[in-house]
Image (cartoon, rainbow, N blue to C red):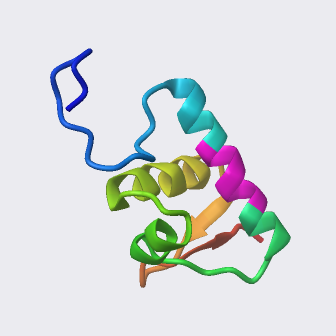
Amino acid sequence: MDTANGRARAHAHTPESDEEMTRLVLRVRGEYREMPGLRLTVRQAARLFSLPPDVAHSVLDELRQATVLTCSSEGSYSLTQ
């Protein structure tokens, strides 16, 4: 349990700050740029990047909002063309 705020941490990689979230976003963006054909669902991204699914979703959605990624109707995230 995180005694500073009284809530349990679900996973060691859950971002605790905006700075940590920014690092995750940059890391995931870099992976997509290194592999331009990469198409991942939230579940696949969570496994690949060792993140809880809710964090993976937040990261992918932030990149989608920044128009770095696009999300297909099937829920796969890929680089925006």
Residue 46 higher or lower than 9, as above or below: below
Give the percent coordinates (x, y) of residue 33: 81, 65
Q: Judge whether residue 25 is colored magenta.
A: yes
- Front residue of this view, candidates 39 and 9: 9
Q: Is residue 20 above or below residue 39?
A: above
Q: Height in image: 32 above or below 38?
A: above
Residue 1 percent location from the top left of the image: 20, 32
Q: Residue furthest right?
A: 34
Range of residues picked out in magenta? 24-30
Q: Where in the figure is residue 13, as x and y percent of width and height?
A: 45, 47
The C terminus sits in image quarter: bottom right
What secondary structure predominates along the stretch shown in magenta?
A: helix
Q: Is residue 57 above or below residue 65?
A: below
Where is residue 31? Give x, y as percent: 74, 65
- Residue at horizontal 62 percent and vertical 35 percent from the top: 22
Depth order, front residue of 5/38:
5
